[in-house]
Amino acid sequence: MSLRGGGPIEELAIPSGTTVEEHDVVVDGDVLVGGQSTVELGVRGRNVAIGERVSVGDDIEAEGDCRLDTWCSVDGNVLVGEDAYLGERVTVTGRLMVSGDLDIGDDVTIEEGFEANGWIVIRNPVPTIVFYFIVLSQLLRVGETDAADELAEALADGDDVRDPLLIPRSTEIADDAWRVSTPATVGDDCRLHGNLRAASIRVGERNEVFGSLRAREDITVGAETVIHGDVTTRGGTVTVEAGARVLGDVSAGDLVVYDGAEIQGTLRARGEMKLVQRTGPETEADEVEEGGGAEAGGSDGVDSEEPDGVDSEESDGVGDDDADPGDGTENETTESAREDDAPETDGESDAEGTAAVTADAGAATEAVESENDS
């Protein structure tokens, strides 16, 4: 890898399933370390490629190939399952054990000796990226596309393609901190030790980080992830998804917290602070059903309530009329009833009056007849 420029690795990418044990970083896939980096932990992976002027503080264990570019130093043993490539002026304080072939450059120091079961060639191996590029370009130039495809499959180990651990140039990795000047991405189901410092950080799901997160830009904490520390960004947005736990303070420009997240410390936001509630599929279905029921009930209510509304309005209107001073409606009703009863009463009184007059006339006639008889 070239000492000039930003390098081919543009971010710190920690693949899913990565764990940091007592002294080692354990990865299922490959490990690529950019130039001029410092890794104070050991490295265990499938294929391990170390750039120029990289310092490794513990053992290196590679299931496949291992390549150490020029001016690298390893404070421990190097165990290689297949072939090993060591550039000029590489220093190994422990023992080098190679199951396959060994290509070794000039002025290489191996303090406790080395052992290789295959061929041992003393030369100056080219850097990893350059070597792969030269081989592929030569195969394509002579028209050996099948051989180029086989080489590409061999580099990827066939169909079993796993995400590598990518460590960019000038990275510092220790037990207490991971420091990079590029964005950092953490996969799922990882267990990491140390504070993570990067330009921006995105942590996946079901991770456990024993340290804090600090970035200049955005930070995202995935679902069911536990952060044993603070989460701080200068001017970016901190997003804490549902089920995540932050056992510390959160400071951000803008803060977005999903329903179900747990933050045990203090929340500080210079800008907006949002609480987002997500609705699951079952709840959405229930809400849709309830909404449909409500709509259906609402339509029935309209049909059934309109007559009631009219009646109620009419009754209200009557009530308002009844509530007028003087109770005109009741008076009108009583007066109409009295008017209806009045003719009958007058007829009865007239009949009574006629009967009384007839009785008086009869009595007077009898009195006159009795006088005439006398």
Image (tube, rainbow, N blue to C red):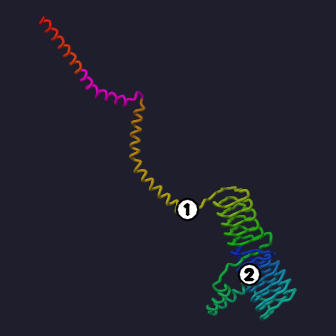
Q: Residue furthest top?
A: 374
- Left or right: 285 with respect to 351? right
Q: What's the mark number on residue 141?
A: none
Q: Residues within 10 Å of mark 1 (few under 14, many from 20)?
A: few
Which portion, as a residue range, is magenta?
A: 325-349
Viewport quadrant of the C terminus: top left
Q: What's the mark number on residue 45?
A: 2
Residue 332 in magenta stretch = yes
Q: CA distance from mark 2 to mark 1?
A: 44 Å
Callout 2 touching callout 1 (CB < 8 Å): no
Q: Residue at x 70, y 75 (%)?
A: 17
Label 2 vs 1, first from the N-terminus: 2
Viewport quadrant of the N terminus: bottom right
> Residue 183 or 366: which is nearer the viewer?
366
In the rendered image, the vertical position of residue 262 relative to residue 2, given as above or below = above
Q: Residue furthest bottom?
A: 119
Quarter assignment of residue 127: bottom right
Q: Residue furthest left?
A: 373
Most common secondary structure along the magenta stretch: helix
Residue 354 in magenta stretch = no
Q: Residues within 10 Å of mark 2 (few under 14, many from 20)?
A: many
Q: What's the mark number on residue 283?
A: 1
> Residue 121 or 290: which is nearer the viewer?
290
Give the x, y percent position of residue 217.
70, 64
Which secondary structure lies at badge 1? helix
Amino acid beneath label 1: Thr
Which secondary structure lies at badge 2? strand
In the rendered image, the vertical position of residue 119 relative to residue 300, given as above or below = below
Q: Residue furthest front?
A: 374
Amino acid beneath label 2: Gly
Give the x, y percent position of residue 326.
40, 27
Quarter assignment of residue 30: bottom right
